Image (spheres, rainbow, N blue to C red):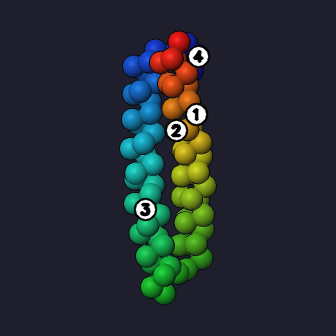
């Protein structure tokens, strides 16, 4: 990431944010199923997978934002 241009970093951030939106929508759908009594082992496992992936994406998004802020100040 250190060698990436600001445009590359912004593009990567946009991709990650789009992925996060898709994962959030899937997570919301799974929560809806669970909340309304349609929970199964598969649903619960998938919700855990999606939540973990979403947390990872949030960490990557936060890191990219931090790098972008630091580079724009320099």
Of callouts 2 and 4, the N-terminal one? 4
Q: Nearer the viewer, residue 71 or 9?
A: 71
- Judging by the rendered image, the residue that carries numbered circle 1 is 63
Q: Are marks 2 and 1 in contact (CB under 8 Å)?
A: yes
Query: In x, y percent, where is residue 44?
Result: 58, 72
Q: What is the C-alpha distance between the residues marked 2 and 1?
A: 5 Å
> Farthest residue toward the bottom?
37
Q: What is the C-alpha distance between the residues marked 1 and 4?
A: 12 Å
Relative height, residue 49 to residue 67 (above, below): below
Of callouts 1 and 4, the N-terminal one? 4
Relative height, residue 48 to residue 3 (above, below): below
Q: Nearer the viewer, residue 13 or 72?
A: 72
Q: Are marks 1 and 4 in contact (CB under 8 Å)?
A: no
At horizontal 44% and vertical 57% (from top left) the residue drawn is: 24
Q: What is the C-alpha distance between the residues marked 4 and 3?
A: 32 Å
Query: In x, y percent, where is residue 53?
Result: 57, 51
Of callouts 1 and 3, the N-terminal one? 3
Give neighbour class at mark 1: few <14, some 14-19, many 20+ (Cα, 10 Å): few
Give neighbour class at mark 4: few <14, some 14-19, many 20+ (Cα, 10 Å): few
Query: In x, y percent, where is residue 70?
Result: 55, 21
- The dot on residue 26 is 3
Give neighbour class at mark 3: few <14, some 14-19, many 20+ (Cα, 10 Å): some
- The dot on residue 61 is 2
Q: What is the C-alpha distance between the residues marked 2 and 3?
A: 19 Å
At horizontal 39% and vertical 28% (from top left) the residue drawn is: 11
Q: Secondary structure at mark 4?
A: loop
Q: What is the C-alpha distance between the residues marked 2 and 4?
A: 15 Å
Q: Secondary structure at mark 1?
A: helix
- Judging by the rendered image, the residue that carries numbered circle 4 is 2
At horizontal 52% and vertical 38% (from top left) the residue drawn is: 61
């Amino acid at each position: 990431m250190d060698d990436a241009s600001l445009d590359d970093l912004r593009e990567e951030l946009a991709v990650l944010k789009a992925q996060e939106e898709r994962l959030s929508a899937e997570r919301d759908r799974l929560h809806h199923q669970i909340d309304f009594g349609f929970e199964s082992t598969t649903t619960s496992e998938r919700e855990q997978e999606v939540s973990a992936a979403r947390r990872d994406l949030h960490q990557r998004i936060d890191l990219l934002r931090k790098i972008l802020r630091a580079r724009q100040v320099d």
